[in-house]
Image (cartoon, rainbow, N blue to C red):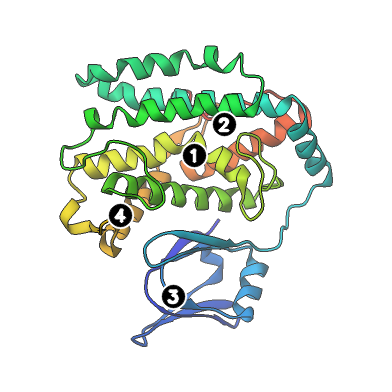
Amino acid sequence: MGKTKYIFSTGELKRRENSISFRDTSGRLTHMPIENIRELYLFNEVTINTKLLQVLSMAGIVMHFFDYYGHYIGTYYPKDYLLSGRLKVQQALAYSDDRRLEIAREIVRGTAENISALLYHYYRHEKKEVKPVIDFCGEISNWLRPAQDIRQIMSVEGKLWSLFYGTFPMVLHEDFVFSKRVRRPPDNPINALISFLNSMLYAKTITMLYHTHLDQTISFLHEPSEARFSLSLDLAEVFKSELVFKTIFDLVNNRKLRVDKHFDSALNYCLLNEAGRKIVIKAFEERISTTFEHSRLHRKVRYETAIKYEGYKMIKYLMEGKAYHAFSVNKKC
């Protein structure tokens, strides 16, 4: 499987025979062998044409677009090459029957388990104030079990994230003040980091699920809707604590980011500047490329591959009835 390529400059992305090249506005030309690329992230104004899209489609390369400020815009999604009518039927049937609630409960339970694992690190290092949230995570099945519809499950999920965000003043460096989650637009550096990294994880999940037979528009926790890959939103949830929030805590507490140097702020918003985005992307790539010993496969696996395996587990559940257990950072599977 190829690598992820990031383009931060303005310029033109073109097909060059059966490969691609990028020429920035200063005239510098970069060749990118197609066999070495799995996905492209564009963070500036880039000119493309249909010949480029043809070669991306042939090679199965997913291309994600962000605007100058780091807002996710959308994805060029090549034609599906892994099609399964039987799976699509089962996915749609599961959305309509009790399996939807079962999957949604498991996604929220797994998310809570992984948040608990993250906070336990701070609890062991004298941050005893996080204990009530760890306790809530441990008891979350008691909250999810009585839920009779998705709205109630999402209410429990909302309470989980609210409690988790409430621990930030206890675990983050004092330069980064955080009081509540604000999305559109983010109003302080922590909200800017959460929004940006959530978008990065969402885009990464789209890429990984592209290489499965799943239909990304049929989801279970989030409502399916037009113009978004809601199944990627579902499966990204369980990885957020490990890939998004561990990255944020590392960058902030180890002073790799500075409020005055890596963010642009105005009256109603705060966003990462280009230098800040490059630091965050580097840290995210390092974390998602980290390997761990998979407890079931008994071999080293990258976190990004674990996202695809999460899709495989979903397929096993839908097609064979094998119980779906969300990814666990403690169990390593």
Residue of label 1: 301
First in sequence: mark 2 or mark 3?
A: 3
Q: At x 56% / y 76%, what residue is drawn? A: 19
Residue of label 2: 297
> Residue 321 appears at what percent x and percent y?
75, 25
Residue of label 3: 45
Judge by depth and name the residue closer to the eye, 114 or 16: 114
Q: CA distance from mark 2 to mark 4?
A: 48 Å
Identity of the amino acid at label 4?
Asn
Q: At x 43% / y 35%, what residue is drawn? A: 292
Identity of the amino acid at label 1?
Val
| Of labels 2 and 4, the one closer to you | 4
| Of labels 1 and 3, the one closer to you | 3
Q: CA distance from mark 1 to mark 4?
A: 42 Å
| Of labels 2 and 3, the one closer to you | 3
Identity of the amino acid at label 3?
Glu
Classify mark 1: helix, strand or loop: strand
Classify mark 3: helix, strand or loop: loop
